[in-house]
Image (spheres, grey):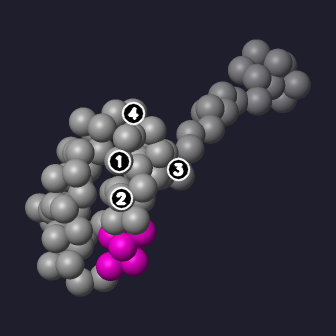
């Protein structure tokens, strides 16, 4: 009888696996998106995952040398006031 029930109902539905890993910040595709991300940093004084994707966009820009130098400073900064100041300076160069 058990064999018949397993044959009729199967072994049970298994849900499809879902990823529980965070996907991270959205990939930046333009200078406008870089400006928006920098504005978030200016407003919050926090970098964290907001820095994700920035180097790739900076490399595509004319001002890449200045911006990359500032990005490295921003990446190393820990003081919220300093973070805001660097991000604001970067926005002015875009």
**Image quarter for residue 70?**
bottom left
> Circle 1: is it few (<14), some (14-19), or many (20+) Cα within 10 Å?
few
> In terms of sequence position, does the residue under pointer 3 or pointer 2 come before the other?
3
The span picked out in magenta is: 71-77
Q: Give me the residue at 62% from left, 38% from top.
A: 17
- Image coords of residue 80 (percent x, y): 19, 78
Disc 3 to disc 4, C-alpha distance: 25 Å
Q: Look at mark 3 in the image and give the residue it sits on.
A: 20
Residue 66 is marked as 2
Q: Are marks 1 and 2 in contact (CB under 8 Å)?
A: yes
Disc 4 to disc 1, C-alpha distance: 16 Å
Residue 85: tell me if it is visible: yes
* Residue 72 inside the magenta-drawn segment: yes
Q: Look at mark 4 in the image and give the residue it sits on.
A: 29
- Image coords of residue 31 (percent x, y): 30, 38
Q: Are marks 4 and 2 in contact (CB under 8 Å)?
A: no
Main SS class of the magenta portion in the image: helix
**Residue occupying the far top of the picture:** 8
Is disc 4 placed on a helix, strand or loop? loop
> In terms of sequence position, does the residue under pointer 4 or pointer 2 come before the other?
4
């Amino acid at each position: 009888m058990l064999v018949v029930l397993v044959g009729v109902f199967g072994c049970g539905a298994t849900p499809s696996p879902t990823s529980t890993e965070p996907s991270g910040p959205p990939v930046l595709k333009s200078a406008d998106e870089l400006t928006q991300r920098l504005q978030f940093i200016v407003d919050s004084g926090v970098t964290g995952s907001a820095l994700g994707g920035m180097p790739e966009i900076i490399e595509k820009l004319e001002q890449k040398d200045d911006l990359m130098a500032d990005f490295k400073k921003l990446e190393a900064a820990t003081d919220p006031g300093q973070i805001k100041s660097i991000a604001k300076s970067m926005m002015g160069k875009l």
